[in-house]
Amino acid sequence: MNKATQDRWRSFFLGNRTQYGLLFSIVLYMLLIAIGFVYLYPLLFMFVTSLKSPADLLNPMVQWIPTEFYTGNYVKAYRVLDYPHTLASSLLISVVPSVIQAAVASLVGYGLARYRFPGKNFIFFLILATFIIPAQNTVIPQMLTYREFGLLGNLWALILPALLGQGYKSAIFILIFYQTFLSLPKVLEEAARLDGAADWKIFVQIALPTAVPAYIIAIIFSTVWYWNETYLTVIFLEGGIQSLPMQLAKFVQAYENLYPPGVVNIFDRLNEAVKLSGTFLNILPLLLMYFVLQKWFVESIERTGITGE
């Protein structure tokens, strides 16, 4: 075997300066598959188990492939969760505050990035303090204030903090918008001012279009955090709006009320598959949102530079 052939085989297996070799690619894909399996295993287990019939649950030979396509668990979970009503409530208390929070955070980030004024560093300190101080430390005075103003059990208990830049984890979104607007070339703003553009016109027509990836990131992350937040939501909205996570937390009791013992046979009693069906219905809207927005979500993360690179 001549030297040229040896170099070709060495390049094929070990790679060269322009491309990875076969051995490196195999190790890389094995590592990615192993990491992906760790994250996907609970989701796959939940979905497969939710499709098992009572007979499959009692059969030790059935692990990953059910013997039939059984949707009875989803029918029960759908009724127990009162799915259409609680889904609409969850969307309302997740999407509305998220859109408002992203709009307010962009205004605050733009002001901090493009203007100089006294006390700017102190405002930064206060913004970081809202993120560093745990929400559990401020929930009692916040709850007493809301009770005094009659906001407990009302959607305004979530909208009002978002309007004032104090929604869930608003400090992160303010810093994202701050960094985005900080990278905006100064000459664009100066040219607009020479053409007679006012401050609000510069923000709407020049700064806002360049921050679309930051808006996508802020709205998606905020929606997911509002959706999954149960501690503060239960305190502020209990007795008023019922979301899917709140209803899921009371799933066992709601199931007992809908299917009381003695009314249904032993096979229709609450089991693991029904619980996992309710859990899957709870995360289904978030999964659909991710699959629909996946392309823009990944591109926005790369553009906003929040990957840590």
Image: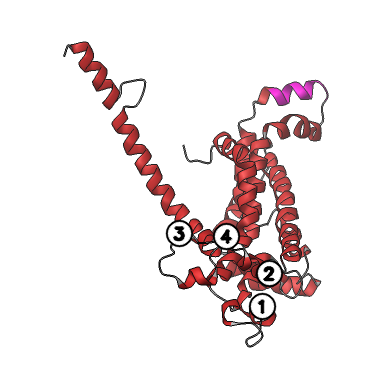
Q: Position of residue 246 (x, y in %)?
A: 65, 70
The reply to whether callout 1 and callout 2 are in contact (CB within 8 Å) is yes
Where is mark 3, residue-wise? 64
Which amino acid is tagged 2? Leu
Q: Which residue is mark 2?
A: 81
- Determine the CA span between mark 1 and mark 2: 8 Å
Residue at 70% x, 23% y: name it: 188
Q: Is residue 43 left or right of residue 170?
A: left
Proximity of marks 1 and 3: CB atoms separated by less than 8 Å: no
Q: What residue did someone put label 1 on? A: 254
Q: Which of pointers 1 and 4 lies earlier in the amino acid sequence?
A: 4
Q: Earlier in the sequence, mark 1 or mark 3?
A: 3
Q: Quadrant of residue 299?
A: top right
Q: Disc 4 versus disc 2: distance between alpha carbons?
A: 22 Å
**Percent from the top left, x then y, of residue 296?**
62, 37
Magenta region includes residue 184: no
Instruction: Point out which mark residue 69 bears.
Output: 4
Above or below — where is 205 with respect to 125?
Answer: above
The picture quadrant where one finds residue 62 is bottom left
* Label 2 vs 3, first from the N-terminus: 3
Foreground tag (1 vs 3): 3
For marks 2 and 3, give the CA distance: 26 Å
Q: Nearer the viewer, residue 288 or 301?
A: 288
Give the residues drawn in magenta, as a range.
188-196
The secondary structure type at the circle numbered 3 is loop
